Amino acid sequence: MKVILEKVPTENEECALIKAAEVTEEIRNAMDLLENNCRSISVAEVSEDRTPGETVMLGTDLIYYTESIDKKTFVYTKYKCYGTKLRLYELEGSLSSNFFRCSKSLIVNIRKIRSVRSEFNGRMIAELLNGEQLVINRSYVKDLKRKLGV
C-alpha cells in the first residue's frame, strides 16, 4: 500500500484520504484508528446463563452493537457477549459517532454493517459483518440513511 503525506497550513483542518478498491475490515480499523475512536469501556464477560464473569477493558472499535434487555445492558463483539453496568444512554454518550441508535433498546456500530435492506413496513434490516441481523425501527431509518450516505 502506498502512503502519501501532504503538509497543509495550520488554519486548514487535517484530514486523511483513503482510496481502496473494497472497504475491508482492515480499512475500517485504519479509519477507526485515524479518527481516534479507540476508546475503552469496562465490561464483564457473560456466560451462557447470563451471569457476569471477569471484568475487562474493551476497545469500542471491537463493539458490533449494544442492547438493553430487562434493564441490563449487553455489549456484543464478533464472537462474545459482555455485560456492563452502564445504561444504554450512558454508553451512547461515551461512544464515537460511528455508533447509531437504531431502536429504543439497541445501538449499532455502523462500521460493522455489511448491508441494509428495506422491509415493507418501513423498517430496515441491517446485516452485520459477523452475519447477525438487526432491525432498524422506522423512526430511525431516515437518520441511518443520512449517516450511511444512502
Image (cartoon, helix red, strand yellow):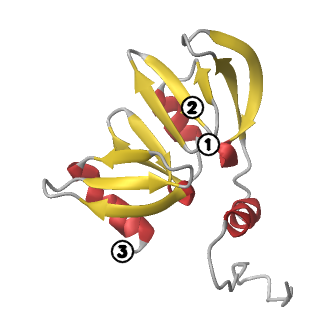
Percent across and percent down for residue 108 are: 47, 46
Q: Earlier in the sequence, mark 2 or mark 3?
A: 2
Choose top left, top right, bottom left or bottom right for residue 69. Answer: top left
To which residue does mark 2 refer?
75
Look at 32% across and 35% down and name the residue there.
104
Look at 50% across and 23% down and name the residue there.
73
Circle 3: residue type? Val
Q: What separation in Å lies between label 3 and label 1 (alpha carbons)?
A: 23 Å
Look at 59% across and 39% down and name the residue there.
94
Circle 2: residue type? Val
To which residue does mark 1 refer?
63
SS for dot 2: strand
Is 65 placed above or below 110 here? above
Q: Looking at this view, is 75 or 39 the one in front?
A: 75
Q: Is residue 98 visible?
A: no
Circle 1: residue type? Ile
SS for dot 3: loop
The image shows a total of numbered marks equal to 3
48 relative position to 18: left or right? left
Q: Is residue 39 visible?
A: yes
41 relative position to 66: left or right? right
Q: Earlier in the sequence, mark 2 or mark 1?
A: 1
To which residue does mark 3 refer?
150
Disc 2 to disc 3: CB gap under 8 Å: no
Is 25 placed above or below 73 here? below
